Amino acid sequence: MTRTPYFDANATAGGKDLGDLPAWDLTDLYAAPDAPEVERDLKWLETACAEFARDHQGKLAEHDATGLLDAVHRYEGIDRVAGRIMSFAGLRYYQQTTDAERAAFLSDCQDRITTYTAPLVFFSLEVNRIDPERLDALFVGDEDLARYRPVFDRLRKMRPYQLSDELETFLHDQSVVGATAWNKLFDETISGLEFTVDGEVMGIEGTLNCLTEQDRDRREAASRELGRVFSSNVKTFARVHNTLTKEKEVEDRWRGMPTPQTGRHLSNDVEPEVVEALRDAVVDAYPRLSHRYYELKRKWLGLERMQVWDRNAPLPMGDDRRVEWDEARRTVSEAYADFDPRMAELAEPFFDRGWIDAAVTPGKAPGAFAHPTVTDAHPYVMLNYLGKPRDVMTLAHELGHGVHQRLAAPQGELLANTPLTLAETASVFGEMLTFRKLLDKAEDQQTRKVLLAGKVEDMINTVVRQIAFYDFECKLHDARREGELTPDEINALWMSVQGESLGPAFDFMDGYETFWAYIPHFVHSPFYVYAYAFGDGLVNALYAAYAEGAPDFQEKYFEMLKAGGSKHHKELLAPFGLDATDPAFWQKGLSMIEGMIDELEAMEA
């Protein structure tokens, strides 16, 4: 198949001393924003949504299995076309969030799709009015419809919190000037910030990267500059957080949601008590995890006190080399292949077909992600690759997401999407495979020590730091219910969890109290963050089963990933003999981190 790639003149591939870094080829979605297929699909969407409402609104409760299955298939088709358009518009935007044309194209697509899909609001509302016994009978009588039962089950969990048809339609219509607009303001503000470190002007990604450099003075300069810039923009960030948390509180109150976290738990298909068991286990383990590790690191760095710019400092016994792109690719691919050749085969197209955008470029969104797009296309991975060892782990992480998304795609649009708690499984497992391969190749104790310490830091960032983030969000949303929060009040909430989670080894500079401002999850996906800790604990337990030689592990693992969102976590973990509802489950995962710290402490004896 011949393709004509669409490349923006301002996008550059490659990086300093890192090799030829890949850039996205988005033509698998659309050739360009003005391609005729974009307008064709938008017009089809408008017609398809209107016809769907004409044929099914007010009739779902009377449909037989054939009629209900037709509705599901048509709804899924609409979801696929809308998802393709928004994936294309969103990915272009994240490549260069400061570009006005890209932002306008994304907004226009959002506006039109929101308007066109408004007639679909009735679907979930009417599904929840179908008599449960009648619906169960339809599932029993039709295997094709029964395959979609998890979709209906998730919809029906929202039944107690459902509003009237008119209010649901209103919330749908106003979303483009509500949370979506505030999200864009946050993205554009963050991406447009400039920081000057040692006379060099850079964006947020480059500045945050300075916090992992060997030069302590440069780390301090970057930290203080981050604090200065965040502080000078803190009123904007406080306004974004105040507005979004208040908007959520209003909607939650109207819906009768018992807690601010309820909506996230429902979307993750996870029980609140499971999340609280995870949270409590991690907080209880702070002294055995982060406090112990950072005391070790303080000694390694030869410091009386740790400062915030030392948290992610390289270890003095490590090297400061940059990992070229080809080496990073080879490392991750070999680790995947050692586990199962199918893993490496599923990852290969990401490197060769323009499915990864790796370089740091002006205006590009910070961080990294894997976007599943739609099930008749493929995922895209975004990185900001700077050649640090952690960047190799980020590549392994995001490729894990990508492999998972490819395996789940045959489930279709409505069943492929995996709850966040399980979506982190394949990504963290990919990291673990890569780490273990590197550890097995370690030629001496010093190399092993550096690798172990790096992995412990990553796990602390994934478990301890994310649960501290979760506690900050819980406090933020609770406090906002009492009234508008000043920047100083939000700062105080942030600091209330930092000392507890990081431990007594640290001092905190002036300005660090504003570091909540740049965390995108608080804005885009409230309470998302516990999914990282959930995934890490789950993967630690899974990897232990794999290392112990659990029979047919690879086949069970692939079946778990292929299930996508079609099964509950209890059903997915049962073949491995694991159960996340068992409090001991989380202790098992945390004990793996403790064991690594034990080994590091033993090396000091």
Image (tube, rainbow, N blue to C red):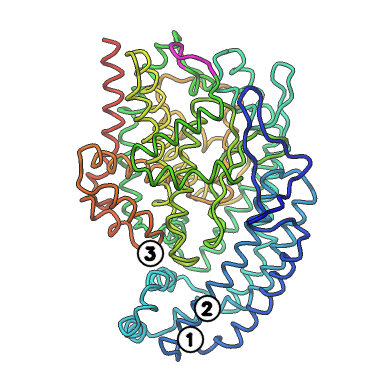
The three-letter code of the residue at mark 2 reads Phe
Quarter that holds the C terminus: top left
In the rendered structure, the answer to whether residue 160 lies left or right of residue 20 reads left
Image disc number at residue 60: 1
Earlier sequence position, callout 3 versus callout 1: 1
The picture quadrant where one finds residue 367 is top right
Mark 1 falls on what kind of element? helix
Label 1 Cα neighbours within 10 Å, binned few <14 / some 14-19 / many ≥20: many
Q: Residues within 10 Å of mark 2 (few under 14, many from 20)?
A: many
What residue type is disc 1 on?
A: Leu
Instruction: Please tell me which of labels 1 and 2 falls first in the chain.
Output: 1
- Residue at (73% x, 58% y) in the render: 107
Q: Seen in the image, is 47 located left or right of residue 135? A: right
Disc 2 on helix, strand or loop? Answer: helix
Q: Earlier in the sequence, mark 3 or mark 2?
A: 2
- Left or right for 382, reference 303: right
